[in-house]
Amino acid sequence: MKFEHVPEHILEMYEKIRSQHFPHLANAKILFLLNKKKMINKGNITLSKIVKPSDLVKFLSKDEAPEYGYDYIILLDQKLIAHCDDTDIKRVLRHELRHTFFDSDSLKNPYKLVDHDFSDFYDEVELNKDDPTWSKRVSQTVSLMYDQEKDEK
């Protein structure tokens, strides 16, 4: 199986991040999954990804996330969770959550995905000023784990 549920401490981490930085997600239903396969985008490793579930997935998940199913799905690289510390995992979660937007004018589905805007960029720079190249470091760590795994086969 390519996916599995994240450990409980990731959900607890999300709740703290949400309450501190993303109050608009208080009622959002988010499914967090570990992706056990390396994700690549434009030739670079991807540590995480947030997506809107299809109508079919929303229908199939309505028992787990009552009423309308999940609003978002966040995929986290399993090697990120296994080999990186909580500070870096929090940074990745915050990064993905910056893509969320609550559209109060949309009654049917107010949860949207957006590109980062400049204020988000500056917020993240400020929050990560102690380690401005964290993303590159974490990507290299995760990539190294995949390379070692490949060499062991």
Image (spheres, helix red, strand yellow):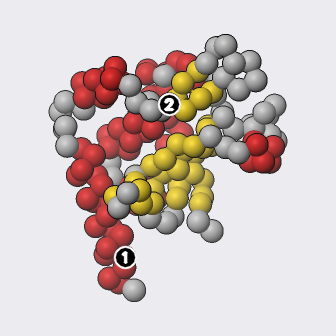
Q: What residue appears at the point 64 percent right and 14 percent down from the top-left corner?
A: 104
| Residue 127 visible in the shown view | no
The reply, left or right, for residue 142 in relation to residue 102 is left
For discs 2 and 1, the disc positioned in front in the rendered view: 2
**Residue occupying the point 34% across, 20% down:** 119
- Across and down, in percent, residue 125 comes to 25, 29
Circle number at residue 119: none
Location of mark 2 (residue): 114
Q: Quadrant of the C terminus?
A: bottom left
Q: Amino acid at mark 1?
A: Glu
The quadrant of the image that shows the N terminus is bottom right
Disc 2 is placed on an element classified as loop
When the figure is inspected, residue 103 is found, relative to residue 17, above or below; the finding is above
The percent position of residue 20, horizontal first and vertical second, equals 43, 20
Separation of residues labelled 2 and 1 (CA atoms) = 34 Å
37 with respect to 59 (left or right) = left
Q: Residues within 10 Å of mark 2 (few under 14, many from 20)?
A: few
**Residue 126 higher or lower than 150, as above or below:** above
Residue of label 1 = 149
